[in-house]
Image (spheres, rainbow, N blue to C red):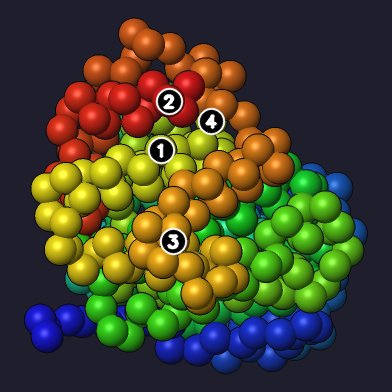
Amino acid sequence: MPPFEFTSVSRIVFGRGQFKRIGELAAEFGRKALIVTNADRTGKLGLLTRLNELLTAHGLTQALFRVDGEPRAEDVDRGVEAARQAQCELLIAVGGGSAIDAGKAIAGLLANGGVALDYMEVVGKGQKITRPAVPWLAVPTTAGTGAEATRNAVIGCPEKHFKASIRSHHLLPRVALVDAELGLHVRPEITARSGMDALTQLIEAYTSTGAEPLTDALALEGVSRAARSLRRAYHRGDDLDAREDMALAALLSGICLSAAGLGAVHGFAAPLGAQFPAPHGAVCAALLPHVLAANIAALRAGAPESPVLARYAAVGRTLAGDASLSQAQALDACGRITRDLVAELSIPRLGQYGITESDIAGLVALARQSSSMRYNPAALSADVLAEVLRRAL
């Protein structure tokens, strides 16, 4: 067995109704909090109002910093300045993965100094985070990125046409508070693309070259929950059992990807999301069936005895809910079931975001630079990657 390293959130509070504990949990770390959020400006269902009440009841005051869309380097730098001006001692990131990534990066820079580009991989200086982030709490309202459990913050750099990570175990939150009730009124299209992001992360982490024993069981558990509940959460947003399954699947996906890495789907997602108005989860969903097919075909042709094929078969059986499938049937199920999911969830094809044939070569070149690509279980040529993207258009 090769050596491995596992780091995760030190405290996870999971369950229905647990949001009511945010005041007591935050009060352990200070009295002035920066709230980083991408919640609806009206405070959908009174979420921000309720947050204010719960914090105030425990003696905390707050300053609000709003993130619109996926965070950019300049957003992080503005957030750092806002926290300093308000003399905040802690942060609470509430919302989707974008808000949580922004809060994570702001908390890290507050403790380490500098600007976002100093620490960003690929497009920045790539400096190391050496000090623990200021205390921060992650409260996801969507079930997708698992950012509440990851040690990287994905930040956009539009001028360089790329999204890249600020990465360190020092960025993990002090508390991840996951309450499925906060997702009950998430719109169906966001439920769909967020859920497909979580599913993609679980599959890629399980089949990654960095896969390890501690994450393997968690990944398959997450795949199982997503397979049985993503459709239900999409079609019936008030199905709390389905919402809770997806919240746990997303959390598990974050834990797994932090330890095991991802693959070619996320390799493409970085340049695609930076250059085109394509939501991250929609990109992952559109690409997933085609990347699975390309990886399985490459392994069958070049390494037919590869144990990764058995891993893909385990994924296929879990997606199908049928442990009796042969390896060939299970490998077929990987592509078939993910294609069916993409269709049922009305995921747009990538061409709808303005991506054309003329963009493919440049996107492939950028994708091959992504940190996620080195964990892909098969070596895919530029021509194969181009065909993957072409099929997703």
Residue 174 in the image: above or below residue 158: below
Q: CA distance from mark 2 to mark 4?
A: 16 Å
Q: For mark 2, what is the residue?
A: 391
Q: Is any part of residue 282 visible from this angle?
A: yes
> Residue 139, position in %: x, y?
63, 70
Q: For mark 3, what is the residue?
A: 330
Image depth: mark 1 or mark 3 in front: 3
First in sequence, mark 4 or 3: give its number: 4
Image depth: mark 4 or mark 3 in front: 3
103 or 201: nearer the viewer? 201
Residue 355 in the image: above or below residue 69: above
First in sequence, mark 1 or 3: give its number: 1
First in sequence, mark 2 or 4: give its number: 4
Q: Which label is found at residue 34?
A: none
Residue 168 in the image: above or below residue 348: below
Identify which amino acid the numbered label 1 is placed on.
His
Q: Based on the displayed image, in which of its 4 quarters is residue 244 positioned?
A: bottom right
Q: For mark 4, what is the residue?
A: 278
Q: Residues within 10 Å of mark 2 (few under 14, many from 20)?
A: some
Identify which amino acid the numbered label 2 is placed on.
Arg
First in sequence, mark 1 or 4: give its number: 4
Query: Please, what secondary structure does the residue beneath circle 4 have?
Result: loop
> Residue 99, position in %: x, y?
57, 54
Residue in the image at 34% along x and 14% along y: 359
